[in-house]
Image: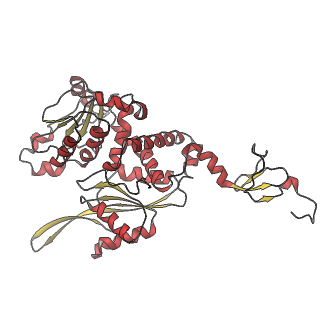
Amino acid sequence: MDSRLKDIVSPDQFDLNFLIHNARDTNIIRELLLTREGKDLLTHVLPGYMIGEFFWQESSRTYHSFAAAGEHLGARVKDERGVKRTKVKNGARTVKWELIFSSEMKDAHLEDEVRAWASFYDALILRTPEEGMVARIINILREFGYDAPVISAGDGKGHHPTQSLLDAYVLPGSLGLDIEKDWKLLSSHRVAFIGDGGSRVVHSLAPIFGKIFKMPISFITPKGLGAPAWLLKDLKSANVDYEERDTLRDASVYYVIRLQDEYLKKAKNASVLQNYYSITKKVADQYNVRIVMHPFPRSKTGNELPIWLPSDPKTHEVSLDKDPRAFYFYQMFVGMPVRMALLKYLLNPHLDLKKLKEERLIRQIRSQCVSCNRIEYHELGWAEYPPACGYIQTLPHIFCPKCQPPSGFHL
């Protein structure tokens, strides 16, 4: 039975083997991206593929890293992005995210729209405003026989699986550990989620850190903004060591999450919440923090992670931006290669990245000389020397220019 993932909807789909496999491919991709030749080789992973990005909600890092990932692999990426619209009907105000160039604006059924997209694209990447919307779309497509893989790039307040995938790649290495060889050592490190416990990033990442990596977890949140009951129940059933608190404590990893603007607007104590936690150099020193992570964007008003500004010397004293413990920019940096590995896994799973150069050359072979065994390539023409393996039976065989027989001779 094929156990390969066909769609990416939830981090519950990931196990240790999947994380290790993705990390291996990510490492190879990162190495190839360092050179021009390597970048050229990567464009032969998904040539001819078309990928559609449909983002109802705004995004910078996820949107652009997926777009760049597809292009680096040789695929073409097309996109459609939404806007938030406020409508008033019969005195009632409603706020809705809409794809402004979609027939959705003409009151089309979502089910019809996604069937159209799946007719045109080899894969769909979706950021939706409603929890469960991605799963609903997948159910429709599979019901009608469409097989284009669907990747959730954020599912309302539900999950953000590819963010958790890249964070699971970042964390072990940041602690000086190899996920494949040293994953058991992660259990000796505590991770503290600081800020909004209801964030979809927490929903997605806490099970991986707690259930797979066996790390003890602290949810450090303002009162009323803790982790949801269903998540805590899931962690408890898996015997994860976790705690809830509203004060800071020692931890190897501080994973900082901004408080959502909508909470601040509704909260009576908004001015207090805005600066409830501010993770500075002093704080990191005080609580023996080894690495600081953040999914971004960080907020200006919340100041949960102070920014370093060249023109403001005061920020140099508090911000972690230039501190070796800051790994949030590294999270951004590896987002693209991690998502490249994921696209390759879904669309070209049998390609061995280690043999990419060899396989590319094989695909480029046009014919072989029947006399001297030299190889003719589509782009490079005739090789100077015959291959070490000699005669390749499966190739078309002709005479190269050097071995042309007398006029009138036929094979």
Measuring from the top left, give residue 266's x and y in whole percent: 10, 51
Q: Nearer the viewer, residue 38 or 278?
A: 38
How many discs mark residues in the rendered view? 0
Measuring from the top left, give residue 329's x and y in whole percent: 36, 38
Name which residue lies at 46% across and 42% down.
26
Quadrant location of residue 399?
bottom right
Measuring from the top left, give residue 344's x and y in whole percent: 48, 51
Residue 68 lies left or right of residue 379; in this view the side is: left
Quadrant location of residue 108?
bottom left
Residue 32 lies left or right of residue 382; in this view the side is: left
Quadrant location of residue 304?
top left
Q: How is the image coloured?
A: secondary structure
| Extreme residue toward the front, this view | 1
| Extreme residue toward the left, this view | 268
Name which residue lies at 21% across and 23% down.
286
User: Quick check: can you spot residue 197?
Assistant: no
User: Quick check: can you spot residue 234?
Assistant: yes
Q: Is residue 87 above or below residue 318?
A: below
Image quarter where the C terminus lies is bottom right
Name which residue lies at 43% across and 50% down.
342
Measuring from the top left, give residue 314's x and y in whole percent: 24, 29
Image quarter where the N terminus lies is bottom left
Residue 49 lies left or right of residue 193; in this view the side is: right
